[in-house]
Image: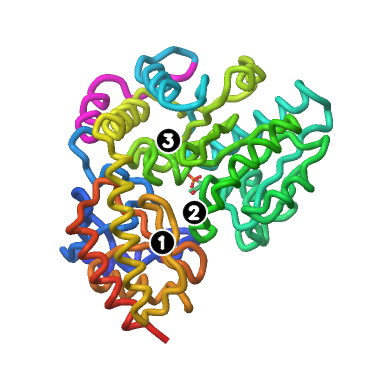
Amino acid sequence: MDTKTLLEWSARYHTPNYGRTPICLVRGDGVRVWDSDGREYLDFAAGIAVVALGHCHPRVTGAIREVAATLLHVSNLYHTAPQIHLAKLLVEHSFADRVFFCNSGAEANEAALKLARKYGKERYASDRYEVIATRNSFHGRTLATVTATGQEKYQHGFEPLMPGFKHVPYNDLRAMERAIDGRTAAVLVEAIQGEGGVNVPDDDYLPGLRKLCDESGALLILDEVQTGVGRTGRLWAYEHAGVEPDVMTLAKALANGVPIGAMLCRADVASVLTPGTHASTFGGTPFVTSVALATLTTVISERIPEHAARMGRELMDGLRALAADGTGVRQVRGKGLLIGIDLDRAAGPVVEACREAGLLVLTAGDRVLRLTPPLIVQPDDCRRALDVLRAALRATAR
Ligand SMILES: *Cc1c(COP(=O)(O)O)cnc(C)c1O
């Protein structure tokens, strides 16, 4: 099948909700992918911060082969060993005591929001159900999570939104303090805002939120769907801040590309989710949890977060040098391998120029380029990406 026909069929048979790049990817290996014309790309998108161990990592592929020949699916009416082992591993390596598995980031946040409402009502009062989220956040595309998402462009046309949500500016403790009241069940934030522009909060922000939540009894829900599993140079981004959330949501990188979501929380909070109160048909099947177990075990045993921190420093140093070079870069920000390059112009043409030169990168909003390479990226790959970026930024400068 030739590429032109594939792209024509795509337009004919898909709903038009994605603005796709006109290439068709057919194969991946490590930090590289190939399209249907045989062109090779250095993949500094990794899905959208999903493929942490790179494409077709042998331990991930091995786990998929083995579980596919053993047991793909049974329901949550029964126990399965991989799900139990994964929950145990997550608990042993985080603040959490309990884990609920689902299939995506939005679903993990849905679980956290339902948990917060139930906890607020049962622990405090029937009208304690409000959630305070932040502007420019991103929490998913379901009706509740798109309501929590503080960006009108994602909500437009889907009104009426869910009741019970408020938004305050990100990285603004005073605004959060003013917004919290006797109806606040939870505060929901990303450890670093990803889609909203790779916005890194001040060092005192998460500790400040922790204190506000402790004083008011509101739950602190941390959306680590993008920042989790080593992306920021620690296994969980909250480790940078020295405080722990009450609830944390995960998805993207947790099974290196196989769909999974997880909601982690303390035992006393989890206790409101009594049998029958929440569920997911596909959540935590032997298939996905085996793959996640292989992924997370590799990330931990091979000290991938530390490697990500080193590579992140190297990339950011290179990018900052590039920023001083008349390329229209206003700011380079991020942590580990979640990096935003704030431009003086639209980021789209730069993404296109990079792709034409064999480098895949993302945007985060209109004017921010986002780099989220596989965490196994090597110094050579970073140098090659910097060369392409420099040329692309120069070619598209104002
Ligand atoms: C991607 C993302 C989500 C949504 O995840 P889906 O799997 O697309 O539902 C939620 N929160 C954050 C921070 C994300 O980056």
Q: Quadrant of the N terminus?
A: bottom left
Classify residue 266 as left or right of residue 319: right
Query: Where on the picture, by quarter, is residue 379?
Result: bottom left
Q: Which residue lies at the image location 57% right of the left edge and 33% below the top edge? A: 245
Front position among marks 2 and 3: 2
Q: Looking at the picture, which amino acid does disc 2 mark?
A: Gly
The mark nearer the N terminus, 2 or 3, is 2
Pick out the residue farthest to the top: 78
Report the residue marked by disc 2.
Answer: 194
What mark, if any, has residue 260 been given in the picture? 3
Q: Which residue lies at the image location 17% right of the left edge and 58% below the top edge? A: 380
Q: Nearer the viewer, residue 165 or 22?
A: 165
CA gap, disc 2 to disc 3? 19 Å
Q: Position of residue 57 (x, y in %)?
A: 21, 40
Q: Position of residue 118 (x, y in %)?
A: 71, 26
Residue range in magenta is 60-76
Q: Which residue lies at the image location 69% right of the left edge and 35% below the top edge? A: 213
Mark 1 crowd level (few <14, some 14–19, many ≥20, 10 Å Cα): many
The mark nearer the N terminus, 2 or 1, is 2
Respond yes or no on whether mark 2 lies under 8 Å from ligand 1.
Answer: yes
CA gap, disc 1 to disc 3? 23 Å
Q: Looking at the picture, which amino acid does disc 1 mark?
A: Arg
Quick check: 96 above or below 237? above
> Are the residues tagged 2 and 1 within 8 Å (C-beta)?
yes
What mark, if any, has residue 370 been given in the picture? 1
